[in-house]
Image (spheres, coloured by chain):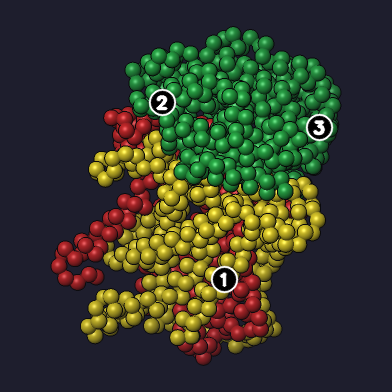
Chain colours: A red, B green, C yellow
Amino acid sequence: MIEGAKWRRWVYFYIPLGIFIVWLLFPFYWMLVTSVRPDRELYRPWMAPNYAPFWTTHPTLVHIIDLLTQTLFIRWMANTLFIAIVSTLISLFCGLLAGYALSRLKFPFAGMLGTGIFITYLVPQTLLFIPLANIIRNFNLGDTPWALILTYPTFLIPFCTWLLMGYFKAIPRELEECARIDGATRWKAMLYVIFPIAVPGILSAGIFAFTLSWNEFIYALVFLSSAHEKTVSVGVTSELVRGDVFYWGQLMAGALLGSIPVAFIYSFFVEYYVAGLTGSVKG
Amino acid sequence: MPRIGRRKFLKISGAGAIAARTGGIAAILASGKAPAFAQGATVHWLRWNDFVPSSDVLLRDKIIPECAKDLGITLNIEMINGNDIQARTTAAIQSGTGPDVICALNNWPQLYADSVAEVTAVADKIGHDQGGFYHVSTVVAHNGKKWLGVPWCIVGAENAYRKSWFDAIGVSKFPNTWDEYRAAGKKLKAKGQPIGQALGHSFGDPPTFWYPFLWSFGGAEVDKSGKKVVLNSKATVEAVKYGVAFWKDCCDEGGLAWDDSSNNRAFLAGTISSTLNGASIYLLAKREPDKYLTEKGTPLWQDIRHGIMPRGPAGRFSCQLPMTNMLMGYSKQQDAARKFLAWITSKPIYQAWFDSQGGYTVGATTIWEKDPIWNKDPVMAPYRTVGRGAEFPGYPGPADRNAAEVLSKYIIIDMFAKAVQGMSAEDAVKWATSEVQKVHA
Amino acid sequence: MAVSGLATRGAFARAPRRGTASRLLEDERWLAAALLLPTVILLALFIAYPFVEGVWLAVTNATVGVPGKFVGLANFEMLWNDSIFRVAVWNTFVYTAVATVFKLGLGLWLALLLNRNFRGKAFTRAFILLPFIIPTVLSTYAWKWMFDPTFSVINWTLFQLDIIHSRINWLGDPGLALISVIIVNVWRGVPFYAISLLAGLQTINPELQEAAAIDGAPPWQRFWHITWPLLLPVTMVVVLFSVIQTFADFQLVYVLTGGGPANATQLFATYAYQLGVGTGLLSQGAAVSLAMFPFLLIIVVVQLLYIRRVEVH
C-alpha cells in the first residue's frame, strides 16, 4: 500500500509497527519469563550482576503446574468464560436493537432516551456496588453467576448502543429504502440489510463487551463468595496475594493463562470479520 | 479455598489422618450424637489470607470437621486479600446480607460499630480465661461500653535486620535509640545496604512504623480525650525533621513507592539491611532455605535477627496490627456464630491455629506469651511480647472513627512523605494539622 | 456498493400477508418501543435504584450501617475545602487529558498500520489486543513488578542502554508516579482504540481512496479529506466512552500506588473509595463520586454537540 522505495516501507510501516508490538507485548513476555523463573532467581535486584531479566537459565513449570493443580484456576476460567459470554450476548442483543432504534427511527423522546441510556454509564462503579448489593439480595442472586451476568450489561449496554449507533449512522439510508421499495418490512430491512453491514461494528462492540466483563473486578469481588464461583481476577488475587507475600510465579502464570487463550479466540474473529467485511462491500 | 501446598503438608503432618478420624458431619449423623444445633446451621467466616499456608490447611482439614463435630455447625471459611475485605464488609452491611463473621483488621470494628451484634459475654469470658486482652486489641475492639467483636490475634511487627551487616559496622546489638539506629543506618547506606521502610499508601507497614516514630518524639494527633487536635506541636515538627534526616541518611528512597510487600522483596533480595515488618520475611526464608540466600551463598534466614522499635526522646512505642472477629448484626445465625466464636477462640482450638502460625501472629490475650513455641526459636523471641505496650493510631486518645479516618486518609504518613519530598517540616505539619482538624470538625 | 441483499430480495417480495404485530412494527414509533424495551427494562431494574440511592447518600450524613439524615449540600461544602479533594480533581484532569490524547494518537496510528495487508495480519491484530484483554488487576501487578524500585526491568534496560546512570524511582517520585500510572493506562487503552478505529476504517469503501489516489491526492490529504471525516463518528464515540472510563478509573491506581505517594496519584474514584469504603463515610464518598458528574457532563455535552455538528455536515 505504501508507494515508493523499500526504505519508505520500513520507516512508515515495519519500524513503527515493530515498536508498537514490542511495547504492547513486552509485559506479556515479562509475565512469561516470571512464570517459568524459579523462585530462587526471582528476588534479584536490578543492579545485581547476575540479574537476567529477559531469560532464565533454569526454566521451571512448577508455578504453572501449581496454579493448575493447587488452585481452582480452571474452574475460575470456566466461570469467567460463561459469565462473559452470556453477559456479552445480552448486551449485544440489547445494544443492537436500541442502537438501531435510536439512530434510524424517528420517534418522540429519541434524544432524551439516548442521553438517558448514556447517563447510566456516567455512574462510577466504585460506589455503585454498594446499593447494587441490595438489588442482588432482593433478587436472591448473591453468590451465583447471574449476579454478574445481569449487572455487567448495565455498563456494557450503553457502550454497545452508542458504538453501534455510530456504525449505523455511517450506513447510507438508501440501502434500507431500496429494500423497502422491494417490499421488505422495516423489521426485515433491519435484520437482513442493515445488521449484516454492521458486522464489524457488532464484532468490535462484542469484543469490547466481552473484554470488560472478562476483567471486571469489583462486582465479582463483592457479589461472589464461594471459592468455586469466583472469576479469574478475583480468584487469582485472593489466592496468590497472601498477606505481604506475593506468589509472583503463579500470579504471572495466572495472568498469562487468563488472557492468551482469549487472544487466540479473538484471532479467529478478527479474521472472520475482515473476510466478512470484504464480502459485503464488494458483494 | 486456599489449596497451596496442601499435598506437601499432608505428607508431612498427616493432617489427612486427623480429618479422617474426625469424619465431619457424616460421622456425627452416623453415630447418632445430638449436635448442639439443628442441622444446616452454617456459619460463613470471611478472613484475610495470611501468608502461612499450613494455617489454611489446618483450618480446612481440621477446624472445619472439628467444628461440625463439636458444635454441629457447618463452617464456611472464605479467604480474600486483606485489601478487599472492606469492600465486602461495606456491601454486606448496606445490603444486610453476607458473611456471618468477618475478621476485621486494624480499627475497622470502630467503623462498623453500629452494625455488629452483641458479643460482650463471649469476649469477656475469653479475656477472663486467658489472662486478659492486650491494650491494643481492646482499644480497637471495645468502644468503652461493649465489645464490638472478639479479638482474634495480633500480627506482630519488629525490625528484621541482617546480623552480619550490622556486625560489619560494629553494631552487635540492634540499636536501642533512634540516634543509634540512625548512626548505624548512615554507615549501612554508605555501603549500599540502606534501611528499607515503606512511606506509601498501604494499610500495614507505613502506619506501624511512622505512627510510633511520631509518638516516640512526643508528637500525637490528639490529646487523651481524643477531641482536641494537638498535632501542631514542637514535638511533631521535631519528629518530622528527624524523620526526613533519617530518611535521607539511612533509607532506601524507593520506599515512597512501597506497599506492604515491597520491603519483604527487597529484604529477601538483599538490598536492604533492616525493615520493620511482620515475621513473614524470616519465616519465608526459613521455610525455603535453598531459595533465599545471602550474598555469600549461605541460607538467608540464618543471618536474620529481630529488634524492637528504638527509643525516642519521649520513650519507646510500637504499633501492632490487631485482628478482631466481628459478629455481624444482619447475620441470621447469631446463636450459632456466637457459639462458634467462643469455640474457636477457646484455648484448645486456638492452640492448634496458634501453633500453625509459628509466631507470625500472637494471641490477643496475654496467656500466649507463656506458650512453649517461643522457646523453639530464639530469633522469634522478640515477637513473644509484641502485644505489650503496643498502641494504635489515635493514641493517646481512643482508636475511634476519627482516628480511623486520619489513618485511612494516610494524613500522618503523608505528612512525613511530603517533608521527605521537600516540603518544610513546619508546612507539612501545618498541612496535616488542618486535615486532622477537618476530620474532627 | 451492492449489498448481499440480492438473494433476499425475492424473499421480501413473497411476504404479502402481515399480522397485527408486524403492522405495528411497521410504525416507526412502535418498532422503536419494541427495540428499546429490553434495554430499558434491564437498566431500570439494575441501575435506576442504585443511581437514586447514590444521589441520596451524597446529601445525607450516612455512614456504613447508619442511614443518616438529610444535610443538603454540606458534604459538597466540605469537599470544597478539602485539599486532598482538590489534588484529586487536578490529578484526574491531567490523567484523563494526557492519557486520552496519547491513546487517540497512538491508537489511530496503530489502526492505520494494521489496516494494511501484511503477513500474520489476523494474528497481529488479535494479539495486539492482549493488554486490553488481560484482567486489569493482574496486568497491573506485572507493571508494579516492572516499576518496582528494587527490581525494575525498565531501569535495567535503560541502564544497559546507557540512558540512565542511577535508578529512576518510577512510583516513588510524585511527578513520575502520575506519569507511570498514565503509561499503564495508555498501554491498556491503545489496543482498544486501535481495534475500534480499525473496524471504522474497514467500513470505509476503499474505492473512495483509490479514486482520490488516481486524482493524484497525496496520502496525507487522502487521509484528511476522505478517511478522517468518515472515521469521525466512530472516533467520537470511542473517545467519549474512553474519557468517561479514564475519568472514573480506579483499579489501576488502587493496585499500583493506592493514591500515594502523598496523594500524587489520587484520583476521583480512588478518593471516593478511600472515603466511602476505607473510612465508611458513605455520604462523603458518594459526594466525591457525584462531584465527578458535572465535570463529566460538561465533557460529554461538548463531545455530543461536536458529534452532532459533524453529522450535520
Is there any visible trace of residue B176 in the rendered image? yes
- The image quarter containing residue B19 is top right
Where disc 2 sits, the SS reads helix
Query: Which residue is more in the foreground, B120 or C41?
Result: B120
Q: CA distance from mark 3 to mark 2?
A: 44 Å
Reply above or below: A283 against B288. below
Q: Nearer the viewer, mark 3 or mark 1?
A: 3
Reply above or below: A253 against C135. above
> Which disc is residue B144 wearing?
3
The residue labelled by disc 1 is C298
Residue A156, image x, y percentages: 57, 62
Q: Residue at (54%, 45%) from the top-left corner?
A: B427
Residue B182, image x, y percentages: 46, 25
In the picture, the quarter occupied by the N terminus of chain B is top right
Where disc 3 sits, the SS reads loop
Q: Amino acid at mark 2?
A: Lys
Is there any visible trace of residue C171 in the rendered image? no
Residue B140, image x, y percentages: 72, 32
Q: CA distance from mark 1 to mark 2?
A: 53 Å
Q: Amino acid at mark 3?
A: Gly
Query: Which residue is more in the foreground, A283 or B83?
Result: B83
Where disc 1 sits, the SS reads helix
Q: CA distance from mark 3 to mark 1?
A: 49 Å
Choose the circle earlier in sequence order: 3 or 2. Answer: 3
Q: Nearer the viewer, mark 1 or mark 2?
A: 2
The residue labelled by disc 2 is B186
Reply above or below: B310 against C43. above
Query: Which residue is more in the foreground, B80 or C298?
Result: C298
Q: Is residue A64 left or right of residue C281?
A: left
Q: Amino acid at mark 1?
A: Ile
| Mark 3 touches mark 1? (CB < 8 Å) | no
Find the residue positioned furthest to the bottom.
A181
